[in-house]
Image (cartoon, helix red, strand yellow):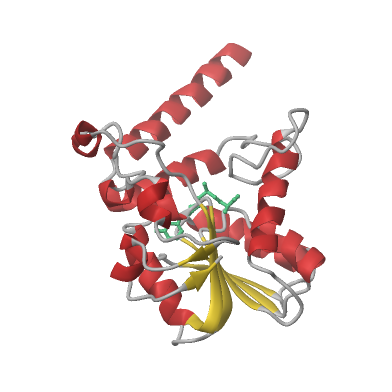
Amino acid sequence: MDEVLVAGADVLEIGRAIRVVAAPPAKRVQRLYELLYHQSNLMGDETSYVNMGYWPRESMTIDEASQALADLVADAGEFGPGDRILDVGFGYGDQDFRWLETCKPEKIVGVNVTPGQVRAARERARAESTTRHLEFREGVATALPFPDETFDKVVALESAFHFSTRDQFFAQAFRVLRPGGLLVTADVIPFEVEEKDSADPEKTSGIVPKANWYTRDVYASGRRPRGTWSYSAPFSAAGCGTVTS
Ligand SMILES: C[S@@+](CC[C@H](N)C(=O)[O-])C[C@H]1O[C@@H](n2cnc3c(N)ncnc32)[C@H](O)[C@@H]1O
């Protein structure tokens, strides 16, 4: 009987995986994360982070490394009391609960394309009585539903590589940031791009749109000491001058 149930579960997982592969590109990322939502264990044993982590020590667990990446991003963004922060592509929101506790911002608003993750984060905020400071919304990174100059900080923690496109997200981020605000990303980028990669559907399957497949030189050209960025190709295309990270 157990074997029948296991086989049944496997068939369901395979069905869900096929739904990811067969989805139109605009729906593929959302279906991928809905698929993960159905699995009993995501990446960590103790947290629901969905990032690959920051590993200053080899002996760390994925839970610790994922949290360390969230802490690194908070440091880079100088998150602090009174901040209004927008977190785009928030997963299950673990980092938002962490930042609320460690940095005491006034408000963190999350936007995420995956409905199951939005529901889970809202439920946790209700259970932990943090809804006054944490608000989780369904939405897409390239059409942020906020007036100009609403936030002090915008963050994309291992999510901007999915956005279609990352440059359009940058444009939206700069629109909703107040003058002098900060955009912080921890992102997935290739070490090298070969000419053939951009035409290779395996490399640019819709999980990472072709337009986002560029190296750190393109991402960060013009970088100055202490993480100051100026007109790189994507930033200048987004209409931005100088951005500090
Ligand atoms: C790799 S996960 C990172 C999640 C979280 N930041 C973390 O570190 O645990 C990528 C997240 O981006 C979200 N996402 C992907 N495309 C998106 C889009 N176009 N707009 C908003 N969120 C998006 C996914 O639903 C998922 O939550």
Instruction: Give the answer, above or below, for where 115 lies relative to 216.
Output: below
Instruction: Give the answer, above or below, for where 46 lies relative to 242.
Output: above
State the residue in front, 239 or 51.
239
State the residue in front, 95 or 184.
184
Horizontal side of 190 relative to 121 (left or right) equals left
State the residue in front, 34 or 149.
149
| Image location (x, y in percent) of residue 85 | 61, 74
For image coordinates 71% across by 76% down, the residue present is: 133
Does the image show residue 212?
A: yes
For image coordinates 41% across by 80% down, the residue present is: 175
For image coordinates 44% across by 67% down, the residue present is: 139
Among the 4 quarters of the image, the one containing residue 2? top right
Quadrant position of the N terminus in the picture: top right
Q: How many marks?
A: 0
For image coordinates 35% across by 35% down, the residue present is: 192
State the residue in front, 234 or 25.
234
Horizontal side of 107 relative to 140 (left or right) equals right
